[in-house]
Amino acid sequence: GGRQRGNPGKLKNKDLVMGLRQRQGPVRYIQAEDRTAKTWGQIIAANLKATEVEYVMTDESSSAISVLKNSGKHHVVRHGAGEYVRGIVHTNSVESAFSLLKRGVIGTFHQLSTKHLQRYLNEFSYRFNRRKEVDAFPETLRRLCEFPPLKFAALTE
């Protein structure tokens, strides 16, 4: 969501979302409680298998730097200094996924509630990860028919 207008550096009334994406692979969005190194560390530990990862690339987030500094795999792109690509080091993969998420929010949903944010994120992860599948529509239709409808009362309780 970027910086809050009128409050530089503060995240009043904003929910935090972390995006993880393997190059040419799937994306996973995670609603984060805060942007502390402890929270980032928990999310990274739960979603990244260090033995299977060759590189981890992030922007200059101090939390990411703190959590990943001793991994030997962390590379930072310094957007604040005008750096967006340095050889194979970039965050374009996850940024393209976030771009589609933001377009979906602006163009379709307009506003997301904190209560249901992770559900929206799961939906957008699903859409992004299947965007190139030729049978996406029939598969979606099949799944819709398999499950009973979610009643509004159950959704809002």
Image (cartoon, helix red, strand yellow):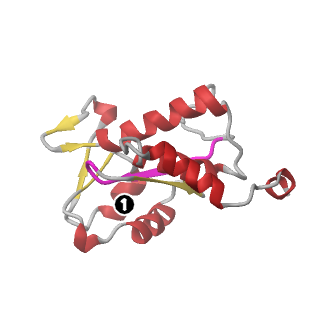
Instruction: Look at the image and tell me whether residue 25 can be seen.
Output: yes
Q: Which residues are magenta?
A: 14-24
Q: Residue at x 47, y 69 (%)?
A: 42
Q: How many marks?
A: 1
Q: Position of residue 112 (x, y in %)?
A: 67, 40
Q: Residue at x 42, y 46 (%)?
A: 135
Answer above or below: position of 3 versus 53: above
Label 1: how many Cα within 10 Å (few below 14, some 14–19, many 20+): some
- Does the magenta portion include 55? no
Q: Give the left or right position of residue 110, taking residue 157 as reference.
A: left
Q: Position of residue 129 (x, y in %)?
A: 41, 49
What's under tag 1, amino acid-wise?
A: Ser
Snapshot quadrant of residue 87: top left
Q: Give the left or right position of residue 126, taking residue 45 as reference.
A: right
Answer above or below: position of 60 versus 3: below
Of residue 42 and residue 144, the one placed in the foreground of this image is: 144
Q: Give the left or right position of residue 85, taking residue 131 as reference.
A: left
Q: Position of residue 92 (x, y in %)?
A: 30, 38
Of residue 20 and residue 84, the one placed in the foreground of this image is: 20
Q: Residue at x 26, y 50 (%)?
A: 23
Give the residue at the far bottom of this rendering: 51
Instruction: Look at the image and tell me whether residue 17 can be seen.
Output: no
Q: Name the residue that disc number 1 marks.
A: 66
Q: Position of residue 14 (x, y in %)?
A: 63, 41
Q: Secondary structure at mark 1?
A: helix
User: Which quarter of the rendered picture does the N terminus lie within?
Assistant: top right
Snapshot quadrant of residue 66: bottom left
Snapshot quadrant of residue 53: bottom left
User: Which quarter of the rendered picture does the C terminus lie within?
Assistant: bottom right
Answer above or below: position of 43 versus 152: below
